[in-house]
Structures are given as structure tokens and as C-alpha cells.
Amino acid sequence: MATERVNLTMDQTALAAARSMAAAEGQSLSEWLSKAALERVMAHAARVSAEQDRLMPEEFAGFDAEREARMFGEAA
């Protein structure tokens, strides 16, 4: 997977917790933060999708696959 260098400013408590979790899972801080961010995005997308399906089940049939393809940069 392609990577890009970024500079972050984080709350010291959050940074300490992230470093601790990364070490506990045998990952670098960069790997752990990348995974955590992706998991958060995916959880949000799942909540939005579930709500859309609940409100308009016929309107969004097949929409999840299209959104997933766009989210991960795959051709639909």
C-alpha cells in the first residue's frame, strides 16, 4: 500500500495511549495510527449505510458496493 508522510499534532494523553497500544500490538506508531484511522472510517461508513438501508431500503440496493469501490479507489 502506498504511504505518504504527514505531520500531526496530538493531545499528549492520546499520543501516549497510541504509542502504548502500538507497542502492545507489535506495530509502529505509524502502522497503528493508519489502521485506527481506517477502522474509524469504516465504522462510520457502516453506520451511515445501515441508517440509509433502514430509511430507504429500495433506494440504496447495491449502493454499498459502489461506495466501497469509491472509498478504496477501485473501479466500480
Image (cartoon, grey):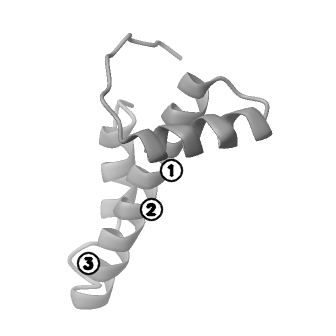
Please tell me which of labels 3 and 2 falls first in the chain.
2
- Inter-mark Cα distance, 1 to 2: 6 Å
Identify the disc placed on residue 52: 3
* 3 or 1: mark nearer the eye: 1
Q: Residue at x 38, y 51 (%)?
A: 41
26 or 58, which lies in front?
26
Q: Residue furthest front?
A: 12
57 or 28, which lies in front?
28
Q: Residues within 10 Å of mark 3 (few under 14, many from 20)?
A: some
Identify the disc placed on residue 39: 1
User: Vertically, is 50 above or below 15?
Assistant: below
User: Vertically, is 25 above or below 75?
Assistant: below
* Labels 1 and 2 touching (C-beta < 8 A): yes
Which residue is tagged 2?
Answer: 43
Coordinates of residue 31 in the picture (x, y in percent): 59, 27
Q: Residue at x 67, y 35 (%)?
A: 22
Q: Residue at x 36, y 62 (%)?
A: 44
Coordinates of residue 13 in the picture (x, y in percent): 47, 46
Coordinates of residue 4 in the picture (x, y in percent): 38, 11
Identify the disc placed on residue 50: none
User: Vertically, is 32 above or below 8?
Assistant: below
Q: The residue under label 2 is which amino acid type?
A: Ala
Looking at the rendered structure, the secondary structure element under dot 2 is helix
